[in-house]
Amino acid sequence: MFIFESVKNTIFGKKMLIVAVAWLYVTVLMAFTEPTVVAGIMTFLFYGVLPLGILFYLTGGKRRKRKRAAEAARRDEPPTV
């Protein structure tokens, strides 16, 4: 799952992954209680997937910067900011 790649190798990666899976479980249960299928899908997307995607994007910033610096060092180029 690409959404969990940003937290996989962090110190709190496993703990954060458990919390994320638990939150997705809660949002799936919330989606099942909606009266229509469309409302269930929207609930799952807006309460589950979207917030977790934003959270993982924000917490993966340092990792992405280190990855860019390592690739630039491998190519002997100055890193971009």
Image (cartoon, rainbow, N blue to C red):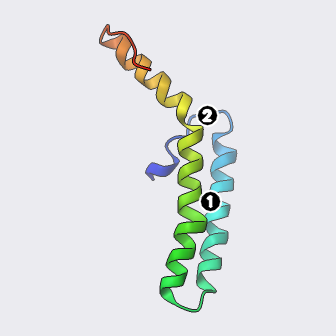
The residue lying at 50 percent from left, 77 percent from top is 41
Location of residue 50 with respect to 61 vertically, above or below: below
Residue 20: x %, y % from top left:
63, 56
Which structural element holds mark 1? helix
Give x and y (percent) for residue 11.
Answer: 67, 33
- Residue 76 sits in quarter: top left
Q: Residue at image x 52%, y 48%?
A: 4
Total residue callouts:
2
In this orientation, does residue 27 appear?
A: yes
- Inspect the image, locate mark 2, and give the three-letter code of the amino acid beneath it: Thr
Q: Which mark is residue 55?
A: none
Disc 1 crowd rating (10 Å Cα; few below 14, some 14-19, many 20+) is: some
Which residue was labeled with disc 2?
10
- Please tell me whether mark 2 sits on a helix, a strand or a loop: loop
Specify the quadrant of the image occupied by residue 7.
top right
Relative to residue 72, is residue 33 drawn left or right? right
Residue sitting at the far bottom = 35
Q: Residue at x 62, y 50 (%)?
A: 17
Observer-nearest of 3 and 39:
39
Q: Is residue 37 left or right of residue 18?
A: left
- The residue at which mark 1 appears reads as 21
Circles 1 and 2, Cβ within 8 Å, touching? The answer is: no
Disc 1 to disc 2, C-alpha distance? 16 Å
Residue farthest to the left, as pictured: 75
Horizontal side of 6 relative to 68 (left or right) equals right
Amino acid at pointer 1? Val
Residue at 66% across / 63% down in the picture?
23
**Residue 37 appears at what percent x and percent y?**
49, 87
From the image, which quarter does the C terminus lie in? top left
- The first of marks 1 and 2 along the sequence is 2
Q: Residues within 10 Å of mark 2 (few under 14, many from 20)?
A: some
Q: Is residue 16 above or below residue 31?
A: above
